[in-house]
Image (tube, grey):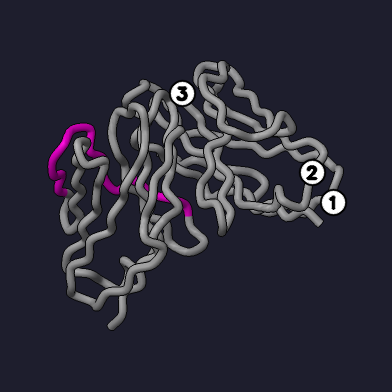
């Protein structure tokens, strides 16, 4: 089975711009979660999608949004980029049952640098 | 809210045993997971405790005590390749809340 893929792997943007990141989950996985990882804050939960519906959201401003398509692929968007948005953005997929989310499969991440 | 605390760094010698602790505060959760992340890599799942007690997977074991709001990951027969960051994570409804991670350095 192919693993979780994320594109692009690296991205450099300027403050004020917007960015869209993409994630393709493992085949058969219906849940996709997004995380922001920074050296000081660790892994911070952004949101989770299942069957095209956002089931859960972390404590991030409205500039961070996402969506999921019928094939379970997901995108996240960050508008009006700030320097503090520089981070590794990870997506993870799982089967999707509430109590099966303990085992998530992570993609390699997108390294976003905001200048 | 939910929060988890882990030691920031742990150092151990090859062949030894090391325990990484995780204490948490939460109003409710399903269980505690552990993940490993090598520098520059993606986190990978190691173990999960849905119930109190010990779970063993090869050289790795994980423990959970809900009454003490405490868990740990035990790594035996340490190898150099075990040098990585280790995260505990609370399983809440449809999400994992991660601790800040413990950087394990294995020395020869």
Q: Is residue B98 above or below residue B77?
A: above
User: Hey, which quadrant is residue A72 in on the image?
Assistant: top right
Q: How many labels does the image show?
A: 3
Asked if badges 1 and 3 are on one and the same chain, I answer yes
Residue on which the image places disc 1: A14
Residue stretch rendered in magenta on the structure: B42-56
State the image coordinates of residue A105 (x, y, percent, origin top left).
Answer: 42, 40
- Asked if the residue under mark 3 is in contact with the one under mark 2, i.e. CB atoms within 8 Å, the reply is no
Residue B47 within the segment the image draws in magenta: yes
Quick one: SS at disc 3? loop
Residue on which the image places disc 3: A30
Q: Quadrant of the N terminus of chain A?
A: top left
| Cα separation between marks 2 and 1 | 7 Å
Q: Left or right: where does residue A66 sit relative to residue A82?
A: left
Quick one: SS at disc 1? loop
State the image coordinates of residue B36 (x, y, percent, origin top left).
Answer: 37, 54
Residue at 71% x, 29% y is A62
Q: In which quarter of the image is the C terminus of chain A?
A: bottom right
User: Hey, which quadrant is residue A47 in on the image?
Assistant: top right
Residue B37 within the segment the image draws in magenta: no
Q: Left or right: where does residue B46 sit relative to residue A16?
A: left
Residue on which the image places disc 2: A81
State the image coordinates of residue A8 (x, y, percent, origin top left).
Answer: 67, 47
User: Hey, which quadrant is residue B78 in on the image?
Assistant: bottom left
- Asked if the residue under mark 1 is in contact with the one under mark 2, i.e. CB atoms within 8 Å, the reply is yes
Q: Chain ID for label 1?
A: A
Asked if badges 2 and 1 are on one and the same chain, I answer yes
């Amino acid at each position: 089975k192919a693993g979780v893929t994320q594109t692009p792997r690296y991205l450099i943007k300027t403050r004020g711009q917007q960015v869209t990141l993409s994630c393709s989950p493992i085949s058969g996985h219906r849940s996709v979660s997004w995380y922001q990882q920074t050296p000081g804050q660790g892994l911070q939960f952004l949101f989770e999608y299942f069957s095209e519906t956002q089931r859960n959201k972390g404590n991030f401003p409205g500039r961070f949004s996402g969506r999921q398509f019928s094939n379970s692929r997901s995108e996240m968007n960050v508008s009006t980029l700030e320097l503090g948005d520089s981070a590794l953005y990870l997506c993870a997929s799982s089967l999707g049952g509430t109590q099966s989310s303990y085992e998530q499969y992570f993609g390699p991440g997108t390294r976003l640098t905001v200048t | 809210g939910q929060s988890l605390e882990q030691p920031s760094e742990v150092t151990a010698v090859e062949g030894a045993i090391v325990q990484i602790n995780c204490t948490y505060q939460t109003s409710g959760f399903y269980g505690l997971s552990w993940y490993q992340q090598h520098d520059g890599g993606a986190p990978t799942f190691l173990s999960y405790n849905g119930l109190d007690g010990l779970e063993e997977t090869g050289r790795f074991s994980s423990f959970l005590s809900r009454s003490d709001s405490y868990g740990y990951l035990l790594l035996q027969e340490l190898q150099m390749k075990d040098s990585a960051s280790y995260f505990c994570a609370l399983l809440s409804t449809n999400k994992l809340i991660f601790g800040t991670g413990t950087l394990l350095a294995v020395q020869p």
